[in-house]
Image (tube, coloured by chain):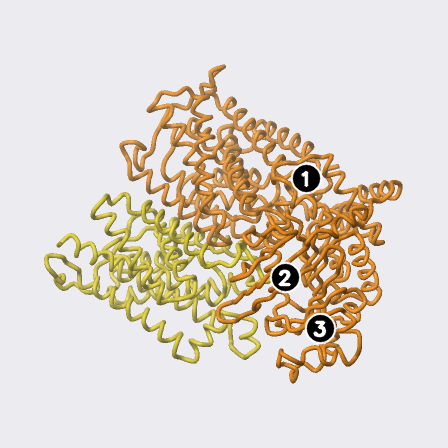
């Protein structure tokens, strides 16, 4: 029972990060039709920057804030400098560009920070919460809580606010919404900024228990993409659920079978599930309007 | 005679020879740090990337998981030689066979995915394989992988020197390029381009796209399989990293840098990136950054990669005289073929001799078809029939469900209820390609041609797409189809279009070209979705004559159009559709023969007469703004 609960607790923590990644990718895709495979790099940037600053003696709170701001700015800069002038490119080319930017980030981090593992302390250092023999750190509780608040907040935002509805509209049909006076450029900026912010926040809260290296971004992006695909690249709420589900799957495989089987097994199952789901939902493979 | 494919694909033998010469000379030139050892690495990675290039450049399938097959193949060689003590030649064959089998299994799951899902699913599989390799360290050696001594014992002799390895790599590259040439030659290359440009049109022309993409996926896996099998003994090492996500993405970077769609793109990219890394990477972790910077610079500023940029530069230097224009894409051959076509007697438009025979058949029968999208019933319980040797018109306002009905008949949309029969055979369960192969051809409101191919090639596709398997190809048949296409164009007075790229034509010309493409295989049923829209009066005249000739030839023709004069002149029977239902049926004279008849077209059951003040006004309006549709 303790193992069972413990698995759920640690999966909730990991799942929060997957969910935040997935929500970030969903936000980018909704606003720009771009699959942002550089999303995970915001986590890496914030994580390494915060760790470096803490090592230089900067207080954790300030360092963390700087990391989050840097991740947000990086994402905004990416949108402004790289993507905005190339929105008319074919989707494959844009995917390749985002991969290139992810590489650039990793290459720079590799040059500047090396291949070391980086880490820093928890922001909440109280004793862990114990439930029936299973423990979850206060930091973990905070991460899960933040994720829930962000997820629920986004769902509320998209459903209930004018701006959110405008963003949904611009995701459905950018041209038509632009003609109706929705500022889709602004929507895109907000989305990318928010995505960067989410990457930064997840780094601030997860790195203390997981460490970060120059190449931490891509695996996170992949998990995030799996989650986002589950959410049909559209629904933040579903991405939240998908992230938790993915981590639970991994967690139980890891606890009850073998930790090394986590990745292959979960990716395999996810892929098959995704294929079945997509095959069902699609009218006709690759179809545009006839 | 290989001019069917665009210029950059022509002269494969010359290119191949040139490449081999360059590859053999390169290490001898004494370029700094370009050792034979690095040369072999470059050639092998270039070979692996070439498979991705085949997929992306020809079939439009971006895989971010290429290292999956590179690694799988390497591990198969490692395991068969070391655990079971197989001799190297057997291990190499096992690696090729095993990797291709893996590609078949994974391809069955993957190739149905669209766009970015396909790209990232491949990446996810590469991650999964990397994870699996780490998960069973007792078999795979865990994260440190498996090692061997760098000797390739081929049974007939051993390879261990750098020069020997280099020659082996070049030989593998030549094999790879031969496979590449074979896969994109003639019909196969055209069909791949069709699938890439427009998968829906490919289906409707009779291409079994799933099978075709699966074949391309498996053939593309051959390249990393071959490279990976050799890389293990060459490097003396295979690790999970070599099969993982980063390696996969780096392979894509190679073809982007070299030039997507160019045969030598992978090799060029590998040369540039790996050599640059060797030049700079004396100390420190520069390699990833160099990858990224070169990759991004090329992705931003040279869409054709380095080869594309070089070609463009060369054309600029050589001056306007040698620059290929759209019209000059295949001019010498096209003109000579035109002359040939003029000399020989053109075949008839449709097999008129069989007309009597055709008339006895049941033709196209649609029984009680319904189709809803979400809550919207686009077509409700529609029945109609089109007998051989008749022209049936389907008219109605926009949104009446005409195009949906045609989509159901041609197999694009699956009906919720009802059946589609051709000469008594139930086609309801068949997908679009099978229906086309059964004899149902169609055109679209907006013509769907492959812009990058010439009109002659587009027409040839009309025959080839529905003919047998993607892999089966015969030069004699290709030549026959080409002659037939040119003859058809000559009949329509359009011979001058043969050598022009479809993308450079105007609407009317494109509509005609698409019509000829649909009719070229003499289908039993032709579905024409607004063929007259956007045409000039003269062109409409031409089209009418053509349709009458078709009817005389025994085809069953279903025409959707808004031009009532056109309909009146051609149609034997007219069906009027409104709100998804057939509201009236009659002869053309009864329904559209007089002004009064036209005015009351939509009155009666439809209940939308208030909104539709006759259809003539609408037809003009539609014709006028046709260009912007879809």
Q: In which quarter of the image is residue A61?
A: bottom left
Nearest to viewer (mark 3 / mark 1)? 3
A215 relative to B83, above or below: below
Nearest to viewer (mark 3 / mark 2)? 2
Alpha carbon distance from label 3 to label 1: 39 Å
Residue drawn 55% across the image and 65% down it: B370
- Camera-side residue: A136 or A196? A136
Tag 2 residue? B406
Alpha carbon distance from label 3 to label 2: 19 Å
Nearest to viewer (mark 1 / mark 2)? 2
Image coords of residue B550 (percent x, y): 78, 55
Image coords of residue B279 (percent x, y): 49, 39
Image coords of residue B52 (percent x, y): 53, 42
Q: Which residue lies furthest to the top in this view?
A: B156
- Chain containing the residue with disc 3: B
Q: Which disc is residue B622 wearing? A: 3
Image coords of residue B127 (percent x, y): 38, 45
Q: Residue furthest front?
A: B360
Q: Which disc is residue B186 wearing? A: 1
Disc 1 with disc 2 on a shared chain: yes
- Camera-side residue: B272 or B195? B195
Q: Which chain gets the orange colouring?
A: B
Q: Earlier in the sequence, mark 3 or mark 1?
A: 1
């Amino acid at each position: 029972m303790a193992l069972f609960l413990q698995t759920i607790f640690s999966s909730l923590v990991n799942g929060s990060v997957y969910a935040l990644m997935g929500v970030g990718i969903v936000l980018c895709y909704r606003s720009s039709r771009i699959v942002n495979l550089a999303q995970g790099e915001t986590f890496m940037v914030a994580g390494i920057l915060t760790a470096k600053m803490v090592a230089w003696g900067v207080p954790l709170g300030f360092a963390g804030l700087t990391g989050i701001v840097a991740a947000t700015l990086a994402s905004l800069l990416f949108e402004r400098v790289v993507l905005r002038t190339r929105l008319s490119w074919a989707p494959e080319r844009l995917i390749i560009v985002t991969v290139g930017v992810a590489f650039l980030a990793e290459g720079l981090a590799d040059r500047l920070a090396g291949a070391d593992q980086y880490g820093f302390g928890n922001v909440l250092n109280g004793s862990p919460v114990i439930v029936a023999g299973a423990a979850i750190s206060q930091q973990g509780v905070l991460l899960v809580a933040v994720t829930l608040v962000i997820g629920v907040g986004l769902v509320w935002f998209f459903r209930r606010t004018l701006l959110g509805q405008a963003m949904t509209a611009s995701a459905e049909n950018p041209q038509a919404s632009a003609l109706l006076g929705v500022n889709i450029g602004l929507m895109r900026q907000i989305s990318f900024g928010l995505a960067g912010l989410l990457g930064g926040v997840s780094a601030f809260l997860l790195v203390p228990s997981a460490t970060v290296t120059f190449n931490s971004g891509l695996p996170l992006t992949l998990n995030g993409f799996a989650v986002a695909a589950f959410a049909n690249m559209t629904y933040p709420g579903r991405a939240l659920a998908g992230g938790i589900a993915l981590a639970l799957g991994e967690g139980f495989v890891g606890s009850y079978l073998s930790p090394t089987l986590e990745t292959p097994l979960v990716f395999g199952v996810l892929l098959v599930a995704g294929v079945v789901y997509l095959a069902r939902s699609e009218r006709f493979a690759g179809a545009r309007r006839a | 005679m290989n001019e069917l494919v665009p210029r950059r694909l022509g002269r494969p033998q010359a290119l191949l020879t040139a490449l081999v010469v360059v590859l053999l000379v390169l290490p001898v030139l004494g370029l700094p740090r370009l050792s034979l050892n690095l040369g072999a690495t470059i050639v092998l990675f270039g070979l692996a990337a070439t498979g991705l290039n085949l997929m992306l450049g020809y079939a439009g399938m971006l895989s971010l998981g290429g290292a999956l097959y590179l690694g799988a193949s390497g591990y198969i060689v490692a395991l068969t030689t070391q655990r079971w003590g197989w001799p190297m030649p057997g291990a190499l064959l096992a690696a090729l066979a095993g990797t291709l089998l893996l590609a078949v299994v994974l391809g069955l799951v993957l190739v149905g995915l669209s766009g970015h899902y396909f790209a990232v699913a491949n990446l996810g599989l590469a991650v999964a394989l990397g994870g699996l390799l780490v998960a069973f360290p007792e078999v795979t050696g865990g994260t440190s992988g498996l090692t061997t001594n760098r000797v390739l014992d081929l049974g007939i002799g051993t390879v261990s020197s750098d020069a020997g390895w280099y020659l082996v790599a070049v030989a593998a590259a030549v094999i790879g390029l031969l496979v590449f040439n074979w896969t994109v030659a003639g019909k196969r290359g055209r069909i791949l381009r069709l699938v890439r440009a427009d998968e829906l049109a490919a289906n409707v022309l009779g291409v079994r796209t799933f099978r075709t993409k699966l074949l391309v996926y498996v053939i593309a896996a051959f390249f990393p399989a071959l490279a990976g099998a050799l890389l293990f003994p060459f490097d003396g090492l295979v690790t999970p990293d070599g099969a993982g996500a980063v390696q996969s993405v780096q392979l894509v970077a190679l073809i982007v840098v070299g030039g997507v769609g160019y045969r030598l793109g992978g090799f060029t990219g590998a040369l540039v990136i790996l050599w640059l890394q060797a030049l700079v990477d004396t100390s420190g972790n520069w390699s990833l950054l160099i990858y990224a910077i070169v990759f991004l610079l090329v992705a931003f500023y040279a869409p054709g990669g380095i080869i594309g940029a070089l070609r463009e530069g060369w054309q600029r230097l050589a001056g306007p005289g040698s620059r290929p224009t759209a019209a000059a894409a295949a001019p010498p051959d096209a003109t000579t073929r035109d002359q040939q076509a003029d000399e020989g007697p053109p075949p008839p438009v449709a097999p008129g001799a069989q007309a009597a025979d055709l008339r006895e058949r049941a033709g196209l029968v649609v029984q009680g078809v319904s189709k809803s999208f979400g809550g919207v019933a686009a077509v409700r319980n529609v029945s109609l029939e089109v007998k051989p040797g008749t022209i049936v018109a389907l008219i109605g306002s926009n949104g009446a469900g005409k195009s949906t009905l045609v989509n159901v008949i041609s197999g694009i949309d699956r009906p919720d209820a009802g059946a589609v029969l051709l000469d008594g055979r139930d086609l309801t369960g068949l997908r679009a390609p099978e229906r086309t192969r059964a004899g149902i051809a169609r055109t679209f409101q907006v013509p769907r041609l492959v812009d990058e191919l010439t009109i002659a090639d587009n027409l040839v596709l009309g025959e080839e797409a529905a003919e047998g398997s993607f892999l089966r190809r015969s030069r004699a048949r290709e030549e026959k189809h080409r002659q037939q296409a040119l003859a058809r164009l000559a009949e329509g007075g359009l011979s001058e279009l043969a050598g022009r790229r479809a993308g450079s034509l105007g609407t009317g010309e494109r509509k005609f070209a698409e019509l000829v493409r649909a009719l070229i295989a003499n289908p039993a049923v032709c579905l024409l979705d607004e063929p007259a829209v956007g045409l000039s009066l003269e062109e409409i005249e031409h089209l009418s004559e053509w349709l009458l000739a078709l009817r005389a030839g025994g085809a069953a023709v279903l025409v959707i159009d808004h031009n009532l004069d056109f309909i009146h002149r051609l149609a034997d029977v007219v069906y009027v559709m409104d709100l998804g239902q057939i509201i009236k049926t009659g002869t053309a004279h009864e329904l559209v023969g007089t002004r009064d008849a036209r005015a009351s077209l939509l009155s009666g059951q439809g209940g939308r007469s208030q909104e539709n003040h006759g259809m003539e006004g609408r037809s003009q309006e539609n014709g006028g703004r046709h260009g912007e549709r879809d």
